[in-house]
Image: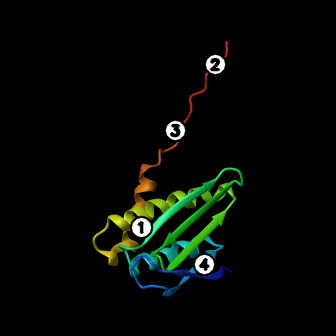
Amino acid sequence: QGCVKFWLRQNRSRGEGRGLHVLTMVYLSDIQDFETAAQELFKQQPLRTRYLVKYRHKEGKVVLKVTNDRICLKFKTELIAYLKHVESFTQKFVGWTATKDLSKVEELDAELEDAKKAAKPKPTAKSKRRKG
């Protein structure tokens, strides 16, 4: 389960004086839940949603962040096994930003997976060399 934290921040850039806004930050523990939540957030506000990848070498952590300035979704991992998921999610997010029709986001994800499978090189039989 994710941990929900509420942050208050002052919004002075819009000239609203001392108005307080609630920023919801959620750490998700599962990459699939993070992808689903990020996709829904992107569908709600595609022009305001942005994606950030942060790598901390000293700690060996990767932090993914998707935000629209109101809702902030984060996923943090130290496991190398998740790097392929990070790469896959990054490709999906770039695809979402390039599409004109947001109702076809799921179709784009399926096309991306099919293209990856087609691009994989097929294993070839190695020839045995004789010693001598």
Compare residues 109 and 52 and report the one nearer the observer: 52
* Residue at 71% from the left image edge and 55% from the top image edge: 59
Q: Which residue is mark 1?
A: 110
Q: Are marks 3 and 4 in contact (CB under 8 Å)?
A: no
The secondary element bearing badge 4 is classed as: strand
Compare residues 10 and 121 and report the one nearer the observer: 10
The x, y position of residue 35, in whole percent, is 52, 72
Tell me which label, 4 or 1, sits earlier in the chain. Answer: 4
The secondary element bearing badge 2 is classed as: loop
Tell me which label, 1 or 3, sits earlier in the chain. Answer: 1
Residue 106 as seen in the image, left or right of residue 78: left
Q: Are marks 2 and 1 in contact (CB under 8 Å)?
A: no
- Amino acid found under the numbered disc labelled 4: Val
- Amino acid found under the numbered disc labelled 3: Thr
Q: Which residue is mark 4?
A: 26
Q: Which residue is mark 3?
A: 124
Compare residues 115 and 101 and report the one nearer the observer: 101
- Amino acid found under the numbered disc labelled 1: Ala
Tell me which label, 2 or 1, sits earlier in the chain. Answer: 1
The quarter of the picture where the N terminus appears is: bottom right
Residue 70 as seen in the image, left or right of residue 104: right
The number of discs equals: 4
User: From mark 2 to mark 3, how far is it between C-alphas?
Assistant: 19 Å
Disc 4 versus disc 2: nearer the observer: 4
* Residue at 37% from the left image edge and 73% from the top image edge: 105
The x, y position of residue 9, in whole percent, is 55, 80
Q: Are marks 4 and 1 in contact (CB under 8 Å)?
A: no
The x, y position of residue 83, in whole percent, is 60, 56
Compare residues 65 and 69 and report the one nearer the observer: 69
Q: Which residue is mark 2?
A: 130
**Is residue 113 in sight in this rendering?**
no
